[in-house]
Image: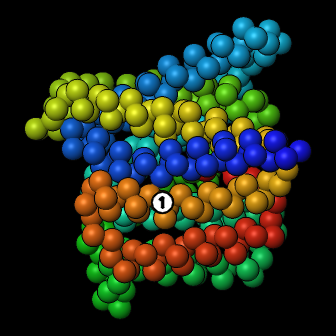
Amino acid sequence: MHKTFQKAYYYAFAAILAWSTVSTAFKLSLRHLTPLGLLLISSLCATIFLAIIFLVNYKRDKTNKPSFNWKIRILSGLLNPFIYYLMLFEAYHRLRAQEAQVLNYTWAIVLSFLSALFLKQKLRIKDIIALFISFFGVLLVSTQGRFWEFQFDDPVGSLLAVSTSLVWAFYWILNMKDSLPAIQKLLGNFLIGTLATFFYALILGKLNYNGLFSSEANITFGILGGIYVGIFEMGLTFLLWQKALEYSTSTASTANLIFLTPFLSLIFIFFILKEHISPATLIGLVLIVLSNWWQKSSRPAKVLK
């Protein structure tokens, strides 16, 4: 039991550490890639990585046959990675990394309300209070503490970052209805999402250098950034987190570790991107994380990210 408990925490901390670096990786990659370019390269790399993992597991276990529900897979793949990351990368392109990653962290609150609507879960007073606390945190970050002026540095970027939570919550609920193993779900999603990204770029006439790379890009750095994001944000880290939950003797305690991620992320943002972390960002983050933690503290822990 003790060794199993240790394994759960090893996998959890590995996933958290990897996720903590991706905000920095997004911004560094977007110096050389457009949001569309980063999505195409990273989702392609994630698909290849997941396909290799699936094939290795399939050889070991011949009963693990692919059995996709294509209706769910197509919709899931359009939501994530296609729509979700296209919006998220555009938000990171427009905003400072600290702002984008904090605003993106409102997904758990949004999920509660959509779960009440689509999964018939009871909506509690606690959920509504947590929503208002989280909303105030969002307002603090978006206005850089000048919430009484209600003026946003980049309203489109802020709206995109917050709206990703809505996309992620819909994706999470849709996957609740699918009993496939995690690796098969992810592989199906990324196959569809990568194809959608390719045809989207083709239709817009952006499947070229100017459409995928920034004006002063270092192509090598851009591609390496896309590979890193594809593996450590989209592929490997989800599998590590899934393993952590499988080995955990207390899913709730393991799942709560996810709230370390945005704080660790700010450390990388400060030291690598050299962004000054504003007090408004820190206070807003604390409000959002605490409201998320308090809101989900009495619900069963089912966390995908």
| Residue under the image location 30 percent in, 49 percent down | 27
Disc 1 crowd rating (10 Å Cα; few below 14, some 14-19, many 20+) is some
Q: Residue 255, image x and y in percent?
A: 71, 56
- Amino acid type at mark 1: Leu
Q: Nearer the viewer, residue 212 or 76?
A: 212
| Residue under the image location 58 percent in, 44 percent down | 15
| Residue under the image location 15 percent in, 35 percent down | 217
Q: Residue 71, image x and y in percent?
A: 66, 29
From the image, tell me which residue sits under label 1: 264
Apparent side of residue 253 relative to residue 171 in the rendered image (left or right): right
| Residue under the image location 48 percent in, 72 percent down | 285
Determine which quarter of the picture holds residue 149.
bottom left
Q: Which residue lies furthest to the bottom in this view?
A: 148
Determine which quarter of the picture holds residue 148.
bottom left
Q: Residue 121, image x and y in percent?
A: 81, 63
Figure check: 66 above or below 248: above
Q: Which of 242 and 167 is in front in this view?
A: 242
Disc 1 secondary structure class: helix
Figure check: 89 above or below 206: below
Q: Nearer the viewer, residue 167 or 12?
A: 12
Determine which quarter of the picture holds residue 101.
bottom left
